[in-house]
Amino acid sequence: MLLNLLLTGLSSILATAGATQNTKDHGKHPVDFKARNLKTIQSIYNLTTFPNNVPILTNGTDAVPPGLFNANATGRITPIGNFSGFADSAEYFFALTLIPSVQNNFTAFFEADVVAFTSECPEIATSVVYINTSNLDPQTGRPTSDNFFALKQIAMWRFDSAGAVLQYEAWIPNLELYTSSAIGGEFSASGTPAGDAGIIGQLCPVIQQECVGPNQEYDSVADCVGSMSDKAFGNFDEVWGDNVVCRSLHTILARLRPTVHCPHVGKVGGSEAEGFKCTNIKYPVDYFDDQKLFGGDGHPFFCDAKNQYHHIRREVEGPGALD
């Protein structure tokens, strides 16, 4: 009986200690940080779907709800490029989305499905998202066919103390296959001299329409066609470069911010003021300039623990790993 009494008392002490520790932990980290981070990620991708994307495509990044991105949000989306600041980041998440129309065979995103998610601390999360695409009814936003495709995006996220995205590292695999299969249209003809010429012939009049006055980059449509025809066509698995595909994306973005994006569609591919988005990059430098892009030690996607990156390296590779 005495033994039972002692065991009962010990169990009570352990339970109380555990509850106290949990309370302390919860005081440090809100118990709902996983739900908060998942909600932020889901909300971001929901805004890429039609008709949720219409206000942003109409009014620009001012229509992005507050609390999703930090004002200094910075990151990399492979294979498109590096982006600094809220406007740049928001544009590349939302402004390249589609509204179903005759021109794109009524194709657009209609659903964002988070198929994988983990968040072990308030400031870090990872996700895999399938952005489902089909031919849509412009009135209802629902699919009108059984023609379904998904754009896949794998991402690492860092959040600020309020839960807004501060830094991100995202990857879109098989973007070329997705574009030719799901979007089709004019880019399905690329890869042949005649097909490439046809796409350039459609792109240049749009550039001349969007980039006017102080933002004009070419003397005429013919000047644009001549310049584009001398460049590599490129492909969507390697958008970042001095090519036609890169300029096609920035032509879309020029509708929202011509001052920023018209230099990117021009002959040089950018400017000192607005950066050089459509110029040839140095692979070992531009895809791995993490310290320059993210600041600090260039490893922002670790939970906040002093020198956690170095601790993990040493655990995996041994004490001399970073000597």
Image (cartoon, rainbow, N blue to C red):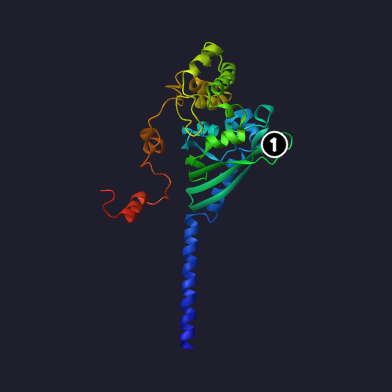
Q: Around disc 1, counting alpha carbons within 10 Å, would you say few (fewer than 14), some (14 to 19), or many (20 or more)?
A: many
Residue 62: percent from left, percent from top:
59, 31
Front position in the image: 69 or 249: 249
Front position in the image: 128 or 223: 223
Q: Is residue 189 left or right of residue 308?
A: right
Q: Is residue 226 visible?
A: yes
Q: Is residue 113 left or right of residue 10?
A: right
- Using the rendered view, name the quadrant where residue 177 is placed: top right
Residue 82: percent from left, percent from top:
45, 33
| Kind of residue at disc 1 | Leu
Q: Quick one: which residue is furthest to the bottom in this view?
A: 1
- Residue at 34% of width from left, 55% of height from top? 316
Q: Is residue 74 visible?
A: no
- Residue at 49% of width from left, 40% of height from top? 171
Front position in the image: 225 or 1: 225
Q: Quick one: which residue is furthest to the top in this view?
A: 219
Q: Which residue is mark 1?
A: 136
- Residue at 64% of width from left, 41% of height from top? 148
Residue 86: percent from left, percent from top:
51, 34
Q: Secondary structure at mark 1?
A: loop
- Height in image: 64 above or below 200? below
Residue 66: percent from left, percent from top:
58, 38
